Amino acid sequence: MALYTHHLPPWKRDEVEMIKKWAKEYAVISLVDIHGIPAAQLQGIRKDLHGKTVLRMTRNTLISHAFAELGGDYADLEQFIEGQSALIFTNENPFSLYRTLERTKTKMAAKPGEIAPEDIVVPRGPTSFKPGPVVGELQQAGIPAVIEAGKVKIKDTKVVVKKGAAIPKKVADALLKLDIKPMDVGLRLQAAFYEKAVFRPEMLAIDEEAYRRDIALAARQAFNLSVNAAFPTKLTVAAIIGRAFSEARNLGVEAGVYEKDIMDAIIARASREAKTLKGIAGGK
């Protein structure tokens, strides 16, 4: 393929060279799917990303040519080129880029034939519809609609389309009537290449708060293990010495070892014991 690219028309050759140039200049190169994004929304996304990233829309074949010519680890990205791919170049880390792209997404109504990104659920409860043909339309879409107190009501919560299934026309029409917008429309990350590694979206979709809590818990557990095992480190040596000092002092007091540093504690203990004994003996 690399040999073939030398015979590309000049404008295609320039595009391939531009992709290769940016791939070497930026820390992260990623593939995103722009299929189904309305032109106005896409322009807004480009505006929001301006200054942070470079969004380049080009042909999949030219992206493939560029990756093949870059060779090495870049070639691993070629398998993720599908649909209507575009390229994003940035110096943000992949996790930050993923969060940025997720913020570009907005909820939109489903179109017949589109694939459900998640289970599409119609919740139970009242609607704003008065009795009429809408009841039959909802029922034909598999939605348990009934008439109650002069209003159309969804009797039970219902999964009308499973994740990964195509959305039937009747269901799409019913969802539109119910103002349920199940489709996330925005830049969908296909893969990101960073420091010779490919990151898939599922690898980047982390709960940051949960991740911070896990790190804090691990740090506390490691600290306690080091102290309890008397394994000194720069962070735990003070706690280990403090614990050892406290245990040695307590041992000296319990054993009645007459050392000047613990004599006050021994005397205080003897005084407490004497008062307790006096109380038991009834003051005699």
Image: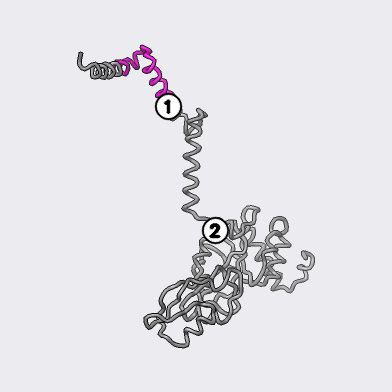
Q: Is residue 195 left or right of residue 143?
A: right
User: Looking at the picture, does residue 63 appear above or below residue 216?
Assistant: below
Quarter of the picture holding the C terminus: top left
Q: What residue type is labelled 2?
A: Ala
> In the image, which residues are magenta?
244-267
Q: Residue furthest right?
A: 3
> What percent of the width, then of the height, locates residue 28?
60, 58
Q: Earlier in the sequence, mark 2 or mark 1?
A: 2
Q: Is residue 275 left or right of residue 209?
A: left
- Would you say residue 264 sits in the magenta stretch? yes
Here the colouring is: one colour
Pointer 2 and pointer 1: residues touching (CB < 8 Å)? no
Q: Is mark 2 on a helix, strand or loop?
A: loop
Mark 1 Cα-neighbour bin, 10 Å: few <14, some 14–19, many ≥20: some
> What percent of the width, then of the height, locates residue 243?
42, 27
Q: Is mark 1 on a helix, strand or loop?
A: helix
Location of mark 2 (residue): 205
Location of mark 1 (residue): 243
Q: Which residue lies furthest to the left in this view?
A: 283
> What percent of the width, then of the height, locates residue 41?
51, 75
User: Looking at the picture, does residue 6 appear above or below residue 170?
Assistant: above
- Would you say residue 96 sits in the magenta stretch? no
x 69%, y 58%: residue: 74
Task: Determine the CA span between mark 2 and mark 1.
Answer: 42 Å
> What percent of the width, then of the height, locates residue 85?
63, 69
Nearest the viewer among 6 and 72 is: 72
Q: What residue type is labelled 1?
A: Arg
Kindly indicate the quadrant of the structure image that contains residue 204.
bottom right
